[in-house]
Image (tube, rainbow, N blue to C red):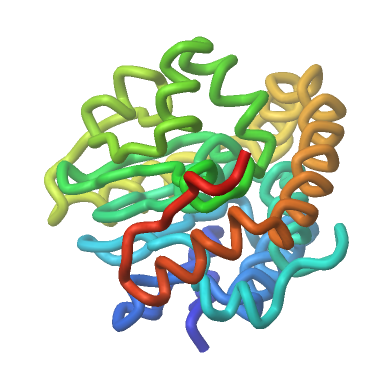
Amino acid sequence: MTIRTEVRDGICELVFDRAEKKNAITAAMYAALAEGLERSATDGAVRAVLIRGSDSVFTAGNDLEDFLNNPPHGDDSPVFRFLVAISTCPKPIVAAVAGPAVGVGTTMLLHCDLVYAAENARRSLPFAQLGLCPEAASSLLLPALAGHQRAAEKLLLGEPFDAAEAKAIGLVNRVLPAVELIGYARAQAAKLVQLPASSVRTTKRLMKGDRLEPVAARMREEGAAFRAMLASPEAREAFSAFLQKRKPDFSKFE
């Protein structure tokens, strides 16, 4: 299994465990993440969720080969099921991010309540570079968080940005040495466990209340565009270039 699910002391840890592929996410991994979040939402023994990788890698994003072999065909596809689960989970979600956090590895953080990053963390949103569009309602949430210009720089150019910049735009609560990251994130999750569960859930619901429907609507809009663009010539060129380890040529497309 490439996602480990561990429940102890009131915390459900969802752990990326595919180090040989830099934790690139397959359809099966999305399904496991969705199941973990869905169970946590209703399990009274779980009072907080912690999503993490190791102290050197969070996730390289989608496993492109698996993604091409198992493309999402509808809202019930594993990736979209995961995005719905993380965006609607009533329990607080903590993320510990080290090393690369590519694509969905960054957009999922917009739905977490506390995000802690290692000094070695590097994020990127290369959707446009792959002939695709944003997902996870990031086209709505990132401009709201960072402002239009900074969000445009991340979503249009797709260039990597470090932990310090992620903190400056409000995507990260605190930056820590890599060796301290997971222990600190666990300690923060443990603080949430000790608080009255109803107070924590109600506070989160009130904070997210006005955004729930706009986020769901934007996810549906992005999802429809994303699925259509997967079949585009630009996306086929981008994926072929990636797998062939060459620079894509988009000059022939209008």
The percent position of residue 37, horizontal first and vertical second, equals 68, 60
Q: Residue at x 41, y 21 (%)?
A: 170
- Quadrant location of residue 21? bottom left
Furthest-bottom residue in this view: 1
Q: Quadrant of the C terminus?
A: top right
Could you say which is closer to the camera, residue 130 or residue 237?
237
Vertical position of residue 70 compared to residue 134: above or below? below
The percent position of residue 132, horizontal first and vertical second, equals 61, 48
The percent position of residue 249, horizontal first and vertical second, equals 43, 53
Is residue 193 in view from this perspective?
no
Vertical position of residue 174 compared to residue 176: above or below? above
Count of marks placed on residues: 0
Vertical position of residue 9 compared to residue 184: above or below? below
Residue 138 is left or right of residue 221, and the answer is left
Is residue 140 in view from this perspective?
yes
The percent position of residue 158, horizontal first and vertical second, equals 40, 38
Q: Residue at x 40, y 59 (%)?
A: 52
Q: Residue at x 65, y 43 (%)?
A: 135
Could you say which is closer to the camera, residue 73 or residue 89?
73
Residue 115 is left or right of residue 223, and the answer is left
Q: Residue at x 22, y 61 (%)?
A: 55
- Quadrant location of residue 66? bottom right
- Quadrant location of residue 182? bottom left
Vertical position of residue 67 compared to residue 173: above or below? below
